[in-house]
Image (spheres, grey):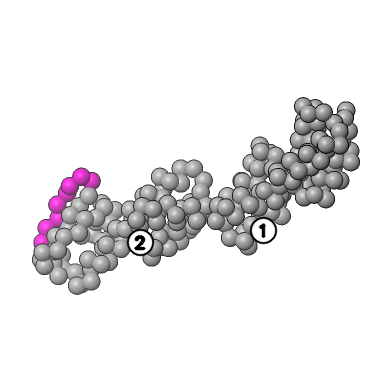
Amino acid sequence: MIIENITFNKNKFIISFDLDIDITITEDVLVKFNLYKGMEVEDNFREILHKENSKNEGLLLSYKYLSNLKTTQQVKNYLYRKKINQYVIDDIIIELEKKGYLNDYDYALRLIHDSQKINRDGKNKIIYKLRSKGIKSNIIDKAIREIDVNLEEKNILYLSKRRFKNRGYNEKEIYSCKNYLLNKGFDSELINKVMENVNEK
């Protein structure tokens, strides 16, 4: 099979073969294979170009999508929505990980930090967030070891005191506050331990 012509159209290159077969590719793919008019290639070369071009387009989409930190699963879902073939997505993920664009463990650590420092969430809610992002269980298990237990206690103390200041301190509000803290993701045992030091003052 021979490349009969190479034309440029709207930031893409159209490769025309002698068997009345055309394929549109990006400049990166053109350069990678050093394509030129009259070049003789194998019969399956069109399929090779198609896969490489899909991978290249997927990487370009991923780089734009990763302007904000994302998980591996989020990128996979995004590329799937953009109609990138699954076998190409797998190759893209490997390359993004090699280049340091994807790192679910780092993502998990950042989420833990922000959840504790900004949202004042407890461990259970943080784990739920990590799972909802599609992060694998072994990565979550490793990352949650970095949860600051002392900060959890401080957050419980802060949240409960703030709630009592606004709502009053009585048996009904104590019960309500414990439920609120459970919904924030704190363990009941830790809630009870910290709230022993909380009073109406």
Estimate the spatial distance between the alpha carbons at disc 2 and disc 1, rounded to whole Å: 32 Å
Image-quadrant location for residue 171: top right
One can see residue 124 in this view: yes
Q: Secondary structure at mark 1?
A: helix
Q: Secondary structure at mark 2?
A: loop
Residue displayed at 89% across by 41% down: 196
| Residue under label 1 | 142
Q: Amino acid at mark 1?
A: Lys
Amino acid at dot 2: Asn
Which is nearer the N-term, disc 2 or disc 1? 2
Q: Position of residue 47 (x, y in %)?
A: 25, 67
x, y percent for residue 30: 24, 56
Camera-side mark, 2 or 1? 2
Mark 2 Cα-neighbour bin, 10 Å: few <14, some 14–19, many ≥20 = some
Q: Is residue 104 left or right of residue 91?
A: right
Which contiguous range is marked in magenta?
Answer: 4-11
Residue closest to the eye, 180 or 146 = 180
Name the residue: 88% across, 28% down. 201
